[in-house]
Amino acid sequence: MFITFEGPEGSGKTSQLPALVDYLEGLGFQVVSTREPGGTAISDQIREVLTSMKNQELHPRTEILLFLAARAQLVEQVIKPALQAGKIVFCDRYGDSTLAYQGYGHGLDLTILRQMLDFATDHLQPDLTLFLDLDVEIGLARKKKASEWNRLDAYALAFHKRVREGYHQLIAEEPERWVTVDATQDMKTVQANLRKTILKKLKSTHLLP
Ligand code: TYD
């Protein structure tokens, strides 16, 4: 079971993940949790280039190639082996981030992006994608307050609004893969919703009775 987490900036995905892992491990599942860009030694080095405030001149085409390079390495080194071993894999951002940020945000051609994604991931698609949704202004304010500001957050507000709208578009195209959770709710309620959604999915695929 391959589960990805998506959302605009400051949606709290990263804070919710550890408790979800603990919960599923408590139910007896083996879980691997990773994040993008990053998750392997090589991908973490690429992440540095992508997020560093000093790389202001990074071109959108360079940016996409770096995201995809980080992802290809993560898929081969971490995600595929874990899935083959029967584990549940959680990934904090995946291909949909590329479509939302580089496609809808920067306006790069979506058809080409999808082909590049297929190449980078060797066609590996998530079974379930959890979308933590919230207003862009609220999310960016949360991140600034937490001092987690990076080069990508610093893109204009209009960019982040296009990203969120892009996600809504992606969900409309493939509603059976996505579940949206309202990320303006308190942490406990969001966690409870995420657990409920994952349990339902595990039951529907008979991984749980
Ligand atoms: P990060 O600090 O991990 O943000 P978050 O906690 O919101 O995931 O930074 C990742 C940034 O990279 C985030 O701004 C989204 C962006 N991103 C893309 O633009 N394209 C991609 O394909 C991926 C995976 C991430």
Image: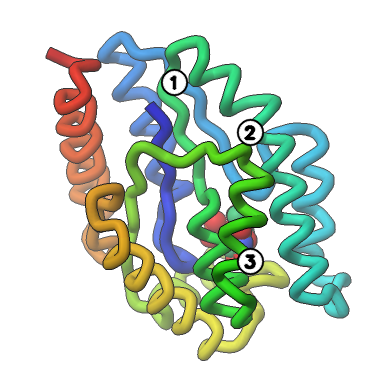
Q: For the point 23% across and 62% down, which residue is it? A: 182
Q: Residues within 10 Å of mark 2 (few under 14, many from 20)?
A: some
Q: Quadrant of residue 7?
A: bottom left
Q: Mark 3 to mark 1: distance in Å?
A: 33 Å
Question: In the rendered structure, are the residues bearing label 2 and label 3 in contact, judged by CB atoms less than 8 Å apart?
Answer: no
Q: Residue at x 29, y 61 (%)?
A: 183
Say which residue label 2 marks: 75
Kindly indicate whether the residue at mark 2 contacts the one at mark 1 (C-beta within 8 angstroms). Answer: no
Element marked by disc 1:
strand
Asked which secondary structure carries label 2, the reply is helix
Task: Confirm whether residue 147 shows in the render.
Answer: no
Asked if residue 59 shows in the view, the reply is yes
Q: Amino acid at mark 3?
A: Ile
The residue that disc 3 covers is 112
Q: Tell me the crowding category of disc 3: few under 14, some 14 to 19, or many 20 or more residues within 10 angstroms, Cα based.
A: few
Residue at the disc numbered 1: 31
Give how far across and how far down residue 154 sits, in percent: 65, 79
Could you say which quadrant of the image residue 204 lies in?
top left
Task: Specify the amino acid type for callout 2.
Answer: Val
Q: CA distance from mark 2 to mark 3?
A: 20 Å
Q: Which colour scheme appears in the figure? A: rainbow
How many marks are shown on the rendered structure? 3
Mark 1 against mark 2, which lies toward the viewer? Answer: 2
Q: Quadrant of the N terminus?
A: top left
